[in-house]
Image (cartoon, rainbow, N blue to C red):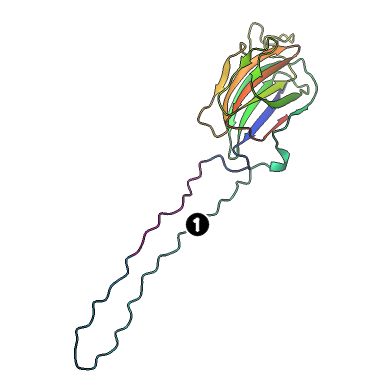
Amino acid sequence: MRGRTIFLALVCGLAVAGCGSDQSASPATSTLPTASVPPAPATTAATATPKPTPTPTKPAPATTPRVPAPSCPDPARWGTDQRSGGPMSRDAVYLVRTGRHECYDRVVFSVNGSADVGFAARYLPVVTSDPKGDPLPVPGGAALEFAIRAPALGSDDAGHQPGRVLASVGDTLVSTPGWPSLRAVRFAGSFEGRCVFAIGVRAKLPFASSPR
């Protein structure tokens, strides 16, 4: 049986662009010396007019245009507003993975079942644990609450992998301090059939999510 996955992608800038660091700096400029011509000695005889010495010209610096990679997503499909959709599922979320791409960082949530599953995502000043409401700070300039409409492994009743749990509340599942957008993923709890994650983001960047 093929399980479901939910993808959360965070773009690498306020405008969709490559995640790699931009190494194109302005070239250093230098002043080229102008060749000087010593004065001709005085003479009573007629002399030919010396030809002017050409001034060396500075070549124009080569420029490399920045071309977006063809895999970069359409910015119109992304946003920072609250987003949600899809039904509740009894299948358990059992794995959280991450990946880096040309234009975005990605978090993948794996669900142990083939039923459709929904999600809800929103930026908050701080994400709180579910159900107690304790603050769960995350590194980065913004905190994204990502709720999956399915229980976490260990709080479900499906009977898969008995005795195992996805995580404890407050656990850091992912730490990526050097990535362009994603900073960390913490488990915020599983209650009443849904599980919640606190995601640290470099800034309040556009995101997109979809189940597969």
- 78 lies above or below 113: below
As drawn, which residue projects farthest toward the bottom?
45
Going 63% across and 46% down the picture, which residue do you hit?
A: 70
User: Relative to 169, is 21 on the left or the right?
Assistant: left
Q: Please state which amino acid type lies under the numbered disc 1.
A: Thr
Going 47% across and 59% down the picture, which residue do you hit?
A: 62
User: Relative to 75, is 180 on the left or the right?
Assistant: left
As drawn, which residue projects farthest toward the top?
163
Residue 67, percent from left and from top = 58, 50
Residue 151, percent from left and from top = 72, 14
Residue 203, percent from left and from top = 60, 32
Q: Indicate the quadrant where residue 183 lies.
A: top right
Q: Indicate the quadrant where residue 127 lies.
A: top right
- 59 lies above or below 143: below
Circle 1: element type? loop
- Viewer-closest of 193 and 4: 193
Instruction: Classify 10 Å Cα crowding around label 1: few (below 14), some (14-19), many (20 and above).
Output: few
> Which span is picked out in magenta?
21-32
Q: Main secondary structure of the magenta part?
A: loop
Going 69% across and 13% down the picture, which residue do you hit?
A: 130
Q: How many marks?
A: 1
Quadrant location of the C terminus? top right
- Viewer-closest of 74 and 30: 30
Q: Is residue 24 magenta?
A: yes
- The residue singled out by tag 1 in the image is 63
- 115 lies above or below 54: above
